[in-house]
Amino acid sequence: MTPNPEVVLVGVPLHCVGMPEPGDPLTGTERAPAALRAAGLADAVAAVADLGDLDVRLTGPDRDADTGVQGWPTVRAATEKVRARIAEVIGAGRVPLVLGGDCTVLPGALAGAHDALGNVGLAYLDGHLDLYDGTTSTTGEPADMPLAVVTGNGPSAWGEAVGAPLVSPGRLALLGPRDRAEAADRNAAMPEDIGLRPEAGPEDLRARGIPEAGAEARDQLSVGASSRFWVHLDVDVLDEAAFPATDYLMPDGLTLGELHALMRPLTADTGLLAGLSVGCYNPAKDPDGSGAEALVSLLGELLRHP
C-alpha cells in the first residue's frame, strides 16, 4: 500500500436531467463540486491541490440529429476539456479526484488517463449499466451512455472524440448495476453481447463476499503493460434509503458500509489507482447536507491512508 497519494481535486459541474439552457442558474448535480468542497472534501482526502471547476456546462434540450445526444456540442466541448485536464494531472504524477457532475464526465476522464498512461482498466460502480446509445436512450441524456462510449459502442462521433475503445473487455469490472431488465426492454446492449464480462449486481457481490469481490476486481484490472485503473462511482449504486440525494432513486442497492468494503481494495494501493470520479450527487436533494458528509467521509477513509 502506498500511503497518502498526491490527490488533486478537479470539479466538472455537469447536469443533464432536464438539461439547462444557457444563462440558467446552476442546478442539480452542477452544484455537487461546490457542495463537496464546502463539506470539507479537500481536507478529508488531504488534497495537495484543488484546480477548481472546469469551465464546462451541458446546455440545450434538443437531441443532435446525428448522434442522438442531447446538447451534443456542449458534451463534446466538456469531454475535450476533461480529457486535457486529466492527462495533465496524471502526467504530473498525481491522482485526480474528479467531482461531477454526472456520469458524462467518464469518457473524457478515461481518455485523459489513456493519454497519460496507455491502456488502463476501469472499475465502474453504478446502479445502471449505462450502455445506451443515441437510439436506445429514451431521452438522449449523455449520462445514459458513458460505458457504451468508452467501450466503442456509443454514438460514433463521441467515440471518435475520445479514441474509443478505451478499455479492453477483460479490464472492465461492472459492479452494482441492477437495471438489466429495464435496459433489455429498451434494447440497450447487454454486456455479454458486446464481449464484456457480465455485471456483478449487489446480490452477486454479497454472495462472493463484498471485500473479496473488490479484491477480485482489483486483480482483474491491474494487469497488462499499464497495471493502473480508473474507478468511477455513481452514487446511485447505493440503495435509495442509504443515499437519497441522487436523481435516479433505486431500491436494492448497496449500503454505505458495503460500498466502503467494495472500494477499499480498489483504492488501497495508489500505485494502481489512476484516478477516481464521483457522479450523480444532487445537493438539491440533500437539504441537511448529510449526503455530502457521507461522501466526504467515504472518500477520506479511502484516499487518506493512515
Image: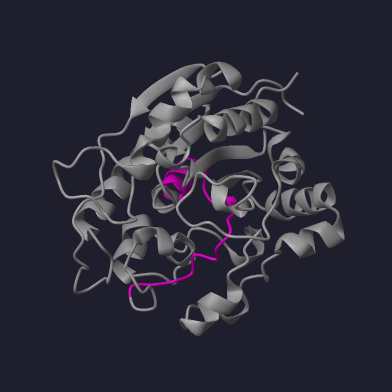
Vertical arrangement, residue 235 with respect to residue 184, above or below: above
Residue 167, image x, y percentages: 54, 59
Residues 27 and 210: in front is 27
53 left or right, relative to 115:
left
Residues 16 and 230: in front is 16
Which residue sits at x=66%, y=20%? 4
**Looking at the figure, which quarter contains the N terminus?**
top right
Residue 168, image x, y percentages: 58, 63
Vertical arrangement, residue 149 with respect to residue 226, above or below: below
227 left or right, relative to 206:
left
Colour approach in the figure: one colour
Does the magenta-highlighted stretch encompass residue 128? yes
Q: Residue furthest left?
A: 23
Does the magenta-highlighted stretch encompass residue 22? no
Vertical arrangement, residue 40 with respect to residue 81, above or below: above
Residue 272, image x, y percentages: 67, 39
Q: Which residues are magenta?
A: 109-134
**Looking at the figure, which quarter contains the C terminus?**
top right
Which residue sits at x=69%, y=27%? 301
187 left or right, relative to 56:
right
Q: Is residue 234 shown to the viewer in this render?
A: no
Which residue sits at x=68%, y=60%? 252
Residue 202 occupies quadrant: bottom right
Residue 220 occupies quadrant: bottom right
Q: Is residue 8 shown to the viewer in this render?
A: yes
Residue 263, image x, y percentages: 70, 42
